[in-house]
Image (cartoon, rainbow, N blue to C red):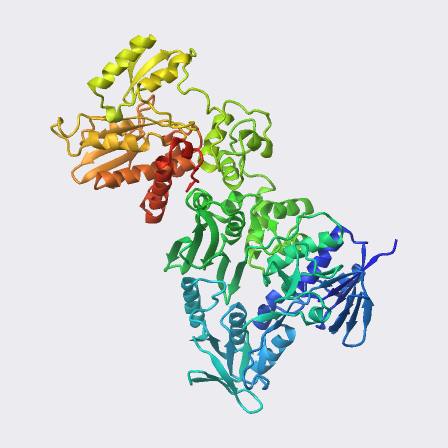
Amino acid sequence: MAKRKLVVIGNGMAGVRCVEEILNIDRDAFEITIFGKEPHPNYNRILLSKVLQGDTTIQDITINDWQWYKDHHIQLFTNETVTNVDVDRKKVMTESGKSVNYDELIFATGSLPFMLPLPGANKQGVTAFRDIRDCETMVETSKNYEKAVVIGGGLLGLEAARGLLNLGMKVDVVHIFDSIMERQLDRTAAKMLQKELEKQGMRFLLEKQSEEIIGRSRVVGLKFKDGTKTDADLLVMAVGVRPNVQVAKDGKIETNRAIVVNDYMQTSVPNVYAVGECAEHRGIVYGLVAPLYEQGKVLAKTICGVENEGYHGSVLATQLKVSGVDVFSAGEFMDSDEVKSLKWIDGIRGTYKKIVIRDNKIVGAVLFGEISEGTKLLGMIKQQTDISVYEKEMNGAGARGQESGVAAIAAMSDKELVCSCNGVTKGTIMQAIEEQGLQTVDEVKKCTKASSSCGSCKTMVSSILDYVHLHGFGQTAEKETVCACTSFSHDELMIEIQNRRFADTAEIMTALDWQTETGCETCRPALDYYAGVHGTSVLNTAANKPAGMQADGTYAVMPKMYGGLTTADQLRQIADLVDKYGIPVVKLLEGPQLGLLGIAAADVSAVRSGLAMTDSGPSYGKTISGVGTCSGISFAADAMQDSIALGVALEKKLERAQLPQEIKIGVSASPHDRAASLSKDIGIVGVPGGWEMYVGGSGERLVKAGQLLCTAATDEELLTLAAAFLQYYRETGHFAERLSQWIERMGLLQIREALFDPFLLKLLGNRMEEKLAASPEQANQQPTAAVIR
């Protein structure tokens, strides 16, 4: 069967990567011809700056050498510019007169450098920075001249400036805006980068609009519209690019800013496609390598007739080293009224981190100086992950920045991206190392393509390589699963429920490959709890069962006595109900609570109604068993604060909070601790200046005193701190995990840091308020997301 003829116009990264994907699907389907206007085989244009800087050679940045084309029977025409495409006759013609027929045609023509139409732009010494020829021009110029001016403070301009500094030239960077790299960095990161580059010798002329290039036949300077000038022996324009679409336009293929394509990279003409910087998808033209590779994969499947979901756009991300300084940005990174942001600035280490949040979802990030979290953040941005998931990892034992390299690799999920350009995960790299016996980073690069594009992940790849060699593949510590029904740990289950929409617990079990059809007594309530806290709706399989079932099948009801207070009317009401329904046991319980025990199932609702106990909605967790108080400021001689008023306020505020495990709270009016607060899960003690809050105590088999968490000057401040603390616990605790166990796992220091961070304190408090303020019906439709671990 004759092969179909595939012609690719453009020998750059996007087009050839698409060809590679086609060969992976069906290496015998096409007779392939590629036209490239440069004299070189396919090379990594991203690393041109390293060639200019003298760090590498053209041979080192070659992706596919001449032998690769020969091995795959690809006809490569270099130094050939395609000038005409006849879509009716399916023919491609070049400037030199070559003519090739096609069955399928791919435009991968990339972009052309934009040259400012300034007077004098045609003088000697004026160049762009786009290909190897431009690099050679700059290198030759540096041998005889001293002063260079780069117009453009974007990434390309800064890389050119760094290369020219390495070549021994003095360099001015001219930029029309008031901060550099405005498309990749917010103002804070931009100013930090500018400061670092100035230390390296760059001089910045910001908010300067170029007017004229000075000189007779050769450039000698640049004049600005404000009347000022700067000397220049070499002028590099790095102000942007424009899609190379003229041939497509002449061929009556629909173009806008670039060649218009659909989700399958098809143009307006049958059998003609476009990929890379010359393609416009849903109104967007992408210039970064990761989106172009994603497009290439889709196009390869489309051309080979493989069913696929199409290309739906990409989250833009930049992770690179600018003149030795690591920077990363992704998604929405600029401040606006529609987003909030978390920021960390370390002036000593010179690092900056910013996480941008919309509706509690991570939508953007900027990193400066330390970018090891970049690929993880990119994955979270793509998944619109709740900010809680990131904060868990940031503050918990898995915080990478505080771990050794080995621990950091071990803590990474196998699904976590290492190379965002090529979509390569940690698991893929580890498996390749183990199965292929890979020994070097270059071998990993050739096998998986990780670090083969921008190279910013090379250090991480090296760390993974070392880790596998030291510990083997899959030798991380065995994790504790929720139960035998699933392979998911508590944390993994929380994350899955946060990031996906499930209709009910049965769907969760099906989607997550539960080993048993209906789960077990351990995982069913855990699923209810995690769905209620982290999901899009409360998925409570036990919602219709009366609460309080006892061992003998009867039920218990605990009348509400806020802060341990009751009245004569309430006691009469209780006595009447005990007589009316023959309740056999009335007992004082710890909490303090009064328990009505032994109630028949048929009478539970009537008893609760008689006590005016409204249903707070389906229960998907545990609650506060009660708030115990001492005799209070009116009756205790040593009282310093009003323990009863605070106890009542606490219980009324937090009674509906669903928690991983039942907790007890005690409020004492003075340090004499008349309410035994220090042996409660939460103990609050009145002191001369206000309140002290202790957590993690226990009065059970192993009596344990609580640890001081924080102090508060007023009742209102204490209520805010207690609500935020419990929200933190409810969102990050494992189901059935006691408060003291949670504190031990999390670490008291980390919990304090969360509550002492004004942003996180407000975030936690707001989430608790939203949940508690909702009606019982709304409470089951307004889940809150986890916060920190």
At 72% from the left edge and 53% from the top edge, which residue is drawn?
302
Q: Position of residue 568 (x, y in %)?
A: 20, 18
Q: Position of residue 58 (x, y in %)?
A: 65, 69
User: Which picture quadrant has residue 533?
Assistant: top left
Residue 271 vs 770, above or below: the answer is below
Q: Position of residue 425 (x, y in %)?
A: 59, 48
At 45% from the left edge and 20% from the top edge, which residue is drawn?
545
Work out whether residue 668 or residue 292 is closer to the camera in this orientation and state it. 292
Work out whether residue 772 or residue 193 is closer to the camera in this orientation and state it. 772
Instruction: Residue lying at the far left in this picture: please name it.
Output: 637
Q: Decide if residue 368 is on the left or right side of residue 113.
A: left
Q: Position of residue 410 (x, y in %)?
A: 53, 43
Work out whether residue 604 or residue 44 is closer to the camera in this orientation and state it. 604
Instruction: Residue lying at the far right in this picture: please name it.
Output: 1
Quarter of the image containing the C terminus? top left
Q: Decide if residue 584 is on the left or right side of residue 486.
A: left
Instruction: Residue lying at the far bottom in this picture: please name it.
Output: 216
Residue 708 vs 2, above or below: the answer is above
Asked whether residue 583 appears in the rendered view, the answer is no
Q: Decide if residue 6 is on the left or right side of residue 433.
A: right
At 57% from the left edge and 32% from the top edge, which residue is drawn?
507
